[in-house]
Image: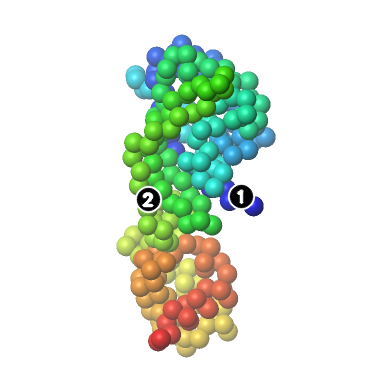
Amino acid sequence: MVNISSASGTMYIDRTFYDRNKKLIDDWVKFYQTPQNHDWYGISYIEIEKLTEDELWLRFYGDGRWSWENTLERVFASGDFESQFNLYKTELTKRLYEDKQSILMEYKDYEPGCEILVEREATLNVEKYKGKYYTEVIVDTDIDIKYNDYNRVATGVEEGYRLDNEKECKSLLEYLKDFYYKNKDMVSENDYRAFKKDVLTYIKDVNELKGGICLFRLEDPGMFLDDLENSLKIV
């Protein structure tokens, strides 16, 4: 079974190219704003973020086949490379190729099964081989973000709390107090202050967390308390 990554970011299209192809690009964007219209492995949603003097900024979300990097060659493609029929995509791909127009893409990609968390900046060029269009991807900036809960929360791919963020830490303490009294029968500590101290130590010291904790860990009390207890055992 193929793992699916979640990508999000911004595409930058030259303003002159956009002005010449405004209706086509607008239709291409609107196509992805209809829920049932999205690529199976590819773009799932696009919206216009900003129109500047030089560029059109497009905010996008996508689903990667294992990773977004593995899927980019299909973003602008034709024939065997295309995951579903999209008339606007086909015509836009052709015009990008004819005008030798590059698109700059900045994105984050997240796939928890393979522990992928990256930020990349890439240049997309449409190329043609044996009559078929495909996307050539030139990676300009490649940052592999250390995979832990702190960074997952910091990059926004998961909801959660970071100890060095005052607002989030305050919210975490409120959550822990509520958690303690709701699950008191399961908690090994005799009072809330001892429980809070152990949890904060756990979040701070465990490499998998590194000063942050994803909300989903706290939403399963039994599993969270088992992980907490195991982390505090002296080996």
Vertical order, 27 against 146 (above or below):
above
Q: Is residue 99 left or right of residue 63?
A: left
What residue appears at the point 66 percent right and 26 percent down from the top-left corner?
A: 85
* x, y percent for residue 97: 48, 18
| Residue indicated by mark 1 | 2
Identify the secondary structure beneath mark 1. Answer: loop
Numbered circle sitting on residue 144: 2
Q: How is the image coloured?
A: rainbow
Element marked by disc 2 = strand
Q: Quadrant of residue 78?
A: top right
Residue at position x 47%, y 14% in the image: 98
> Looking at the picture, how far across and down is residue 114, in whole percent?
51, 56
Q: Quadrant of the C terminus?
A: bottom left
Label 1 sits on what residue type?
Val
Q: Which residue is drawn at the image coordinates 38% and 68% (left, top)?
A: 207
Of the residues shown, which amino acid type is indicated by label 2?
Asp
Report the residue that reaches farthest toward the front. 130
Circle 2 packing at 10 Å, graded few (<14), some (14-19), many (20+), is few
| Any part of residue 148 in sight | yes
Nearer the observer, 176 or 200? 200
Q: Is residue 167 above or below residue 81?
A: below
Between discs 2 and 1, the one toward the N terminus: 1
Q: Position of residue 205 (x, y in %)?
A: 35, 73
Residue 218 sits above or below residue 48 on the image: below
Q: Residue at x 63, y 20 (%)?
A: 87
Q: Position of residue 123 (x, y in %)?
A: 39, 30
Q: Are marks 2 and 1 in contact (CB under 8 Å)?
A: no
Residue lying farthest to the top in this orientation: 20
Q: Nearer the viewer, residue 139 or 174?
A: 139
Count up the numbered dots: 2
